[in-house]
Amino acid sequence: MKTIDLNCDMGESFGAWKMGADAAVMPYVSSANIACGFHAGDPATIRGTVRLAVDHGVAVGAHPALPDLQGFGRRVMRITPQEMYDLVLYQAGAVEAFARAAGARLHHVKCHGALYNMAANDEALSEACARAVKDLGGGVLLYALAGSRMMAGAARLGVGAVGEAFADRGYEDDGTLAARNRPGGMIEDEPKAVAQALAMIGEGYVTSLSGKRVPVKPGTLCLHGDQPGAAAFAKALRAAFKLHAIEVQAP
């Protein structure tokens, strides 16, 4: 039986602003990437989302980002490797504290938005991110774009890393994610997202926006919590996985 981790970006509400359908999605995923307050989230939301994950037996992860509430962490900023290290360690430490208070532990770190893409394409930033995860201790894993420089950086530092692929995102020919504003960059058609997920898990490829088959070996599959109909997507993915004898579990 094949296995896959199904992760979701969560805890992205803050103050009076509500984002996502965490309570509806949580029963269908195995890992939660919880916003740390820089692109979304706040202390109360972190606490509540950690509690929700623990109650459902879902692995608790930190989702650090650039300090960009207004742009939801999706605007590129020029940062140094030291700043990358500090951003990741500081934010992951906050989620780790709430996990410990809930009787759980921090399982993984997955960067958000522009920070994720910057690290995936920059060797110095990728190594700084991996070093921060290593210094967290406790065997915390790094979730990184499959085949990216982040995976290579983690390997050089001896950090456990899990290659990530996306059910609801379009891909370029080089295996990078297509821009969200590009036609096909976001997949909102449920059957298409399911078919893409099954091809990646079962056959080891993703079809790029140009029609090219790009090799990919995912250990974890991301579903975006801010995607319209995220709960329906999650439910459809789990039904398809069950039909194809694919077990969902955190690494």
Image (cartoon, helix red, strand yellow):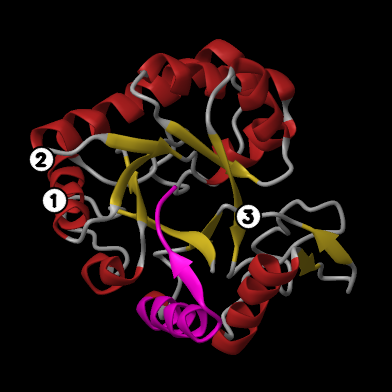
Name the front one of labels 2 and 3: 3
CA distance for labels 3 and 1: 27 Å
Looking at the image, tell me whether mark 1 or mark 2 is earlier in sequence order.
1
Q: Can residue 168 be seen here?
A: yes
**What residue is rendered at 73% in x and 59% in y?**
178
- Secondary structure at badge 2 equals loop
Looking at the image, tell me whether mark 3 or mark 1 is earlier in sequence order.
1
Report the magenta residues as a range.
231-251
CA distance for labels 2 and 3: 29 Å
Q: Are marks 3 and 1 in contact (CB under 8 Å)?
A: no
Q: Does residue 118 lie above or below 181 as drawn?
A: above
Q: Which disc is residue 30 wearing?
A: none
Question: In the drawing, does residue 198 fall left or right of residue 213?
Answer: left
- Secondary structure at badge 3 equals loop
Considering the whole magenta stretch, tell me its main secondary structure: helix
Was residue 239 drawn as part of the magenta stretch in this picture?
Answer: yes
Was residue 2 drawn as part of the magenta stretch in this picture?
Answer: no
- Secondary structure at badge 1 equals helix
- Closer-to-camera residue (244/199): 244
Q: Quadrant of the N terminus?
A: bottom right
**What residue is rendered at 59% in x and 30% in y?**
77
Q: Which residue is mark 1?
A: 51
Q: Which residue is mark 2?
A: 102
10 Å crowding of disc 2: few (<14), some (14-19), many (20+)? some
Name the front one of labels 3 and 1: 3
Q: Which residue is mark 3?
A: 218
- Residue 235 in percent (x, y) is at 39, 81
Q: Amino acid at mark 2?
A: Ala
Looking at the image, tell me whether mark 2 or mark 3 is earlier in sequence order.
2
Q: Does residue 6 lie above or below 162 as drawn?
A: below
CA distance for labels 1 and 2: 6 Å
